[in-house]
Amino acid sequence: TPEEIKRAYKKQSLLTHPDKLAQKGQQVTAADQERFTNMKHAYEVLSDPHKRETFDALGAKGLKWVEEPFSMDPAEMAHNFATSSFLDRSKIFAIFVAIAIGIFVQPILICLAVDGILGPQANWFAVLAPIWLWNAFILFYHVRVIMMGPIPRPEGIPEEEWVDPLPMKRRYLSLARFLLVIIFEVLIALRLQNVIDWKWSVLFIPIYIVEAVTLYKKVSIARMQIVTVEELETTIMGKPFAEFTQEEKDAIAKTYTLVPSHNSPEFAGAYKMKLRARREILRLFLRALFVVFFILQLDLGLDWSWWLVFIPVWVASFCICFGSMQNFVFIQTIAAKRDPEFFGGGSANDNSGDGVDVENQANYGAMGDGDNPGGENQEPISPEKREALKMQIAMSGQQVVSSCCSQSFLLLIICLLVAKLQNPDVYAAMWIIFPTLLIAGVILCCLGCMIFCVSEEIPDFDAMGTAAAGQPPSGYSDPEVGNIAPSSGGNEESANVVYVPPPPPPHQHEQASETSGAEAQASKPGELPTTSANVGDSTANAYYGERSSSQQPVNLLISSPPPQEQPMDTTSKDAAMDTQVVHSINSLD
């Protein structure tokens, strides 16, 4: 029970807390601190019902991945994935296939029903079965969240400072909104099934309510006033903040948003929230306008072109792309204001070239207080802040590209839908979702190749290139010489090199056995023998070598014997001596 867990935590804290150990005269080590930290983390997991369920289902690593998805080591994940079995990889690929099926099964069923492939009397409740299953899953989640109750206050946070991040009021409102969406879906299914003959304006009543609630919330955020504490004390209230009563603080919290200064991160966050609320109000207005055009076209039977009915959609897509581009330009101007030498393409006072005034551009839409707009008296920016500005510019640029690409693809789908509504016999309804099916198929194929072809074996491209050029790659094994390694040159290992001839070919064993040892010893000092002194076991022992008494590694320098059929002259013999190679037999030890 929670009480037992709490008592056990207090008991263990008295035994393992570093301060308690120091009071007892014990020396606190890193192991003691780590043990106390692990015990505290275990208590946090056990005292939180959600974390406890996640730990029971996924374990410690799964809980860490859920709480911090980017905390997992990419190298460890890649190693685990590369060493996984074919069955495990098949399970992973099956998950992606199941996700794709869950996403596209409903659009495919709707297209088949519209084209009449499921029969002229297709039951729309059966066609919309995937939606009902999905709604049941989401409804269970909402009920589960409500049954969890309020989130308990963590220890260490005072009661007056604790704010529930997910209050019960918000949970009930989310559930009510979702129930309105389900009611709308049921009404649409009844209308398509000809069970009811209500007008479309009546069927959209749940959507009206949802949009009205959203508009009320966004308007309050868009109209909020962002003020600093200094402005509140001097201009609005006329007295210090410490003298405010609790009623005055509550009234201020409902009307204003307090920030330390105009250059603080709190101001930037509040300003972005205000901008997002205004953009959402614009999108909501366009959605409402589209619903009105759609209802008038269906209920009144107006002979409007469907391309005109979808005008709000075209405008919304344009606004999204234009807004992302405007945000990109806005961030660039802010960066040029803060560091004109790096982001402005020149010095702060250099307005030559295309005639653009950097100072005037920096003032446009700036979130600061308007002081020091130029770069003449501005303090130099630190490298960390410069990197942060570069990151913001890169992210805004990526947002522009992603917004334009996504809206272009969405417009392609909508154009296919409008053309189908304008002329129902022009093509099958399946062509409307064909672009999404094509992209999903390509993505699945790429995922399949990545999942089943990933391996830890890295090909040696240098060796491939060397072999293609007609040269043996490093580590090449010759059947008569053995593993070849480059010579160590004049390093300290050269004192342990023993020069031994290679074993003769099998057809020369008899001839080599008749050769005396004196002939081999008659070689000049520094000259390598060209034949083996012994064959059989003695040749093998000489070929594989022995470790010296000092247990130092022995390297063999092998000289290929000249062919017996063609005697070599002095020049050829010297050239053969220059082609000596060195290889190590440490692995044979």
Image (spheres, rainbow, N blue to C red):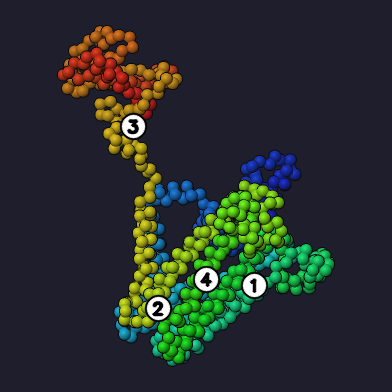
Instruction: Looking at the image, tell me whether mark 1 or mark 3 is earlier in sequence order.
Output: 1
Residue on which the image places disc 1: 221
Cα–Cα gap, marks 4 and 3: 63 Å
The structure residue drawn at horizontal position 64% and vertical position 52%, both measured from the top left corner, is: 348
> Of 541 and 573, which appears nearest the observer?
573
Residue nearer the viewer, 309 or 288: 309
Could you say where residue 433 lies in the image, as x and y percent from the top left? 37, 72
Report x, y in % for residue 32.
65, 44
Q: What residue type is labelled 1?
A: Ile
Q: Return the mark for residue 418.
A: 2
Element under label 4?
helix
Q: Tag 1: Cα neighbours inside 10 Å, few (<14), some, or many (≥20)?
A: some
To which residue does mark 3 refer? 475
Q: How crowded is mark 4: few (under 14 residues within 10 Å), some or many (20 or more)?
A: some
Asked whether disc 2 touches disc 1, contact meaning CB atoms under 8 Å apart, the reply is no
Ranked by sequence position, the earlier of labels 3 and 2 is 2
Report the mark closest to the observer, 2 or 1.
2
Query: Reading the chain from its start, which is encountered first: label 4 or label 3?
Result: 4
Q: In which quarter of the image is residue 150?
A: bottom right
Res. 328 image quadrant: bottom right
267 shown above or below 224: above
- Quadrant that contains the C terminus: top left
- Image position, residue 220 (x, y; %): 65, 75
Question: Residue at the spot x=83%, y=67% of the render?
Answer: 239
In the rendered view, would you say 394 is above or below 187? above
Residue extending farthest left: 565
The type of residue carrying mark 4 is Cys
Q: Which disc is residue 402 wearing?
A: none
* Residue at 68%, 63% in the rendered image: 267
Picture residue at 33% right of the left edge, 85% below the top = 121
